[in-house]
Amino acid sequence: MPNQRLPVVLALTALIGAAALWTRRAERRRSDRRQRLQAFIPAPPSAIAPSLMLVRTLPRRGIRDLMLLGRLRMALDAALGATGDRIGYAHLAVVQAIAAAVVMIFASQVLSLAIGIVMICGVAAALSAGLLLIHLFQISYRNRFLNVFPDALDLLDRAVRAGLPIIDAMEVAAREIPDPAGTEFRRVLDEMSIGVTIEEALQRTADRIRVPDFSFYVVALNLQRRTGGALAETLGNLSRVIRRRKEVRLKARALSAEAKASAAVLAILPFFVGGMMYMLNRPLMSVLFTDPRGRLWSGLPC
């Protein structure tokens, strides 16, 4: 019976790999279209010639696609943007294909589950692996951003105290502050160079990277531009608050590290010991998956 399920599992793995290749080609086509559209951006608008419209009316098929997959695609693009664009659809497809293949082979060959349950487990593993990958990269990008963002605020504070406008101060920060904070400031300045206001550019960046500390900076700058006040003092206070928040996070992480490590060890230990025993004495552990009493004891369907 397991030998009959193996071709089905291999066929599903091949289909997932083909989907990954198709996704990679779609991402390349989208990147090419984006580069062609950016070629129109540096051109200054002419007062006589009519402006070039890059927006066209979507056909009925495109409208249906937008209604069905538009929200999911926008949510996924936003989630990938929160990783600093370090991963794309191709990375997600590869990781999901590997996770689905491993889980389906394990469920089919070791647990001897039905083909329907095997497919459900494969889909669940693919979705979980994709979400986990996005979450890990988002945390990594957020931590890297927060490591240098207080230094960027201090530089903006000194530049404003020296008499520079906030836009010129942001240009200095974009040159001097390392990535990823410097990259985000350069992206804001690039959007402003094509006519986007500073409030909209900063808000788009805050929505994309999803860092609360940067949202504080956006709110403080918008309030100062509307109501006035000492911007240098506001930036200095914000820098101190962000550094204090970082200290509190690190202290909480240090205090809870022992409990988290103990919980992780206790959660992984049964699976690790079971896997080692299965490798050393397979007939002994196979009783849990082949015998009805063992399957009942382990919680598997009989």
Image (tube, helix red, strand yellow):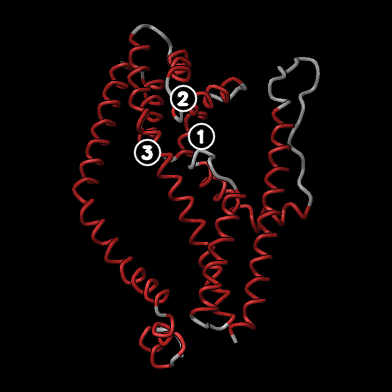
Quarter residue 140 falls in: top left
Residue 236 locus on image (x, y percent):
28, 21
Distance Cα–Cα, label 1 vs label 2: 16 Å
| Residue closest to the eye, 63 or 150 | 150
Q: For this view, does 288 lie left or right of residue 196? A: left
Q: For this view, does 171 lie left or right of residue 240? A: right
Residue behind mark 2:
182
Mark 1 or 2, closer to the camera: 2
Question: Does dot 1 land on a helix, a strand or a loop?
Answer: helix
Distance Cα–Cα, label 1 vs label 3: 20 Å
Residue 61 locus on image (x, y percent):
77, 55
Quarter residue 268 falls in: bottom left
First along the sequence among labels 3 and 2: 3
What's the amino acid at mark 3?
Asn
Q: For this view, does 153 lie left or right of residue 9? A: left
The quarter of the rendered structure image containing the N terminus is bottom right
Residue behind mark 3:
143
**Residue drawn at x 54%, y 24% as measured from the top left:** 197
First along the sequence among labels 1 and 2: 2
What's the amino acid at mark 2?
Gly
Distance Cα–Cα, label 3 vs label 2: 14 Å
Count of numbered labels shown in the rendering: 3
**What is the residue that sits farthest to the top in this orientation?**
163
Give me the disc on residue 294. Answer: none
Residue behind mark 1:
204
Question: Does dot 2 land on a helix, a strand or a loop?
Answer: helix
Task: Mark 3 and mark 2 in contact? Answer it, CB < 8 Å.
Answer: no
Mark 1 or 3, closer to the camera: 3
| Residue closest to the eye, 9 or 165 | 9
**Residue drawn at x 59%, y 55% as measured from the top left:** 94
